[in-house]
Image (tube, rainbow, N blue to C red):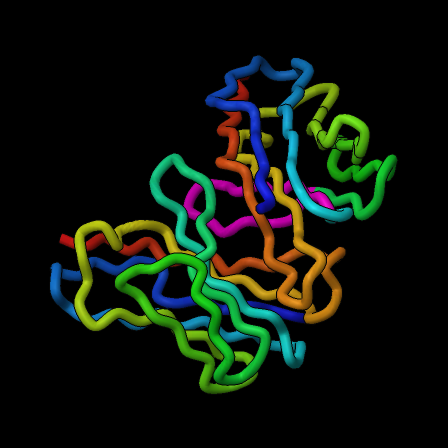
């Protein structure tokens, strides 16, 4: 069966520090991968998606970047965090080519920038 | 572009009450529609889905029907339990290769005993 791992679960970082959140998927190959951010009491904002290794599409201009160095690994990064980067970050995957299937989400990372 | 509008919350109900959470959407073409549930401190998990008009998705006593004529996908449950307390998200998926999803803002449901 497929599983998705996301870590760390919680993170407190000072303003200006770097960030690296990692997400890995097991049990499937060539998935579509997604990074979402959820602000407190708000819906999900799609930040990045990837349809293959090294292929990253950005949905919104921001202080963050994403990379996909391996088929089932998706990394969210920042060189210098801002206070506004605080939020709940969710990684998700979906089988490529099957848009009638659901997305599977990781447990999320609660990031607090202080 | 695509959009999903959900009934604003929070919603507070007594146990065994009837639940309706409204969801309407705007999309080009024929999207697939989903309801996800998020328990505190966790990621989202699929509750139910419908992939074409007039389909009814159901799971754990929850139901939603894909209504193309009204572009709606309202979530219903006949008798809620305390354990149903969570945030509910309506979503649609875009029929492109990336399968990007568009989410509503979420509706927080609290069920009191």
Report the number of numbered marks: 0
- Residue B60 quadrant: top right
Which span is picked out in magenta? B32-47
Classified by dominant secondary structure, the portion drawn in magenta counts as strand
| Residue at 56% across, 15% down | B13
The percent coordinates of residue B36 (x first, y second) are 61, 43
Question: Which quadrant is the C terminus of chain B positioned in?
Answer: top right
Residue A67 vertical placement versus A7 (above, below) = below
The answer to whether residue A80 is left or right of residue B21 is left
Residue in the picture at 70% in, 27% down: B74
Q: Nearer the viewer, residue B13 or B96?
A: B96
Residue that appears at 45% across and 71% down: A23
Residue B38 magenta-highlighted: yes
**Residue lying at 76% horizontally and 32% vertically, measured from the top left:** B64
A84 vs B17: above or below: below
Q: Say if the magenta span includes residue B65.
A: no
In the image, taking residue B2 as reference, residue B77 lies left or right, namely right
Residue A62 is left or right of residue A56, and the answer is: left
Would you identify the image quadrant in which residue A78 lies? bottom left
Give coordinates of residue A36: x percent, y percent: 45, 56
Q: Nearer the viewer, residue A63 or A9?
A: A63
Considering every residue shown, the one lying at the far right of the view is B54
Q: Position of residue A98 (x, y in %)?
A: 75, 64
Most foreground residue, A32 or B71: B71
Q: Please identify the quarter of the rendering in which residue A61 is found.
A: bottom left
Measured from the top left, where is residue B100 in percent x and y? 60, 58
């Amino acid at each position: 069966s497929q599983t998705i791992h996301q870590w760390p679960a919680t993170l407190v970082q000072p303003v200006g520090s770097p960030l690296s959140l990692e997400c890995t998927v097991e049990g499937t190959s060539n998935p579509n991968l997604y990074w979402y951010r959820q602000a407190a009491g708000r819906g999900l904002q799609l930040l990045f998606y990837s349809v293959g290794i090294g292929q990253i599409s950005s949905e919104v201009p921001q202080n963050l970047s994403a990379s996909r160095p391996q088929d089932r690994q998706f990394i969210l990064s920042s060189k210098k965090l801002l206070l506004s980067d605080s939020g709940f970050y969710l990684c998700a995957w979906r089988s490529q080519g099957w848009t009638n299937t659901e997305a599977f989400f990781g447990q999320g990372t609660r990031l607090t920038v202080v | 572009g695509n959009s999903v509008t959900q009934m604003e919350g929070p919603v507070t109900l007594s146990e065994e009450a009837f639940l309706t959470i409204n969801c309407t959407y705007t999309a080009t073409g024929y999207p697939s529609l989903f309801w996800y549930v998020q328990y505190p401190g966790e990621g989202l998990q699929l509750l139910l889905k419908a992939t074409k008009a007039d389909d009814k998705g159901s799971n754990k006593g929850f139901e939603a029907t894909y209504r193309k004529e009204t572009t709606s996908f309202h979530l219903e449950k006949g008798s809620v339990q305390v354990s149903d307390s969570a945030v509910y998200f309506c979503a649609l998926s875009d029929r492109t290769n990336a399968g990007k999803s568009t989410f509503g803002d979420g509706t927080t449901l609290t069920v009191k005993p």
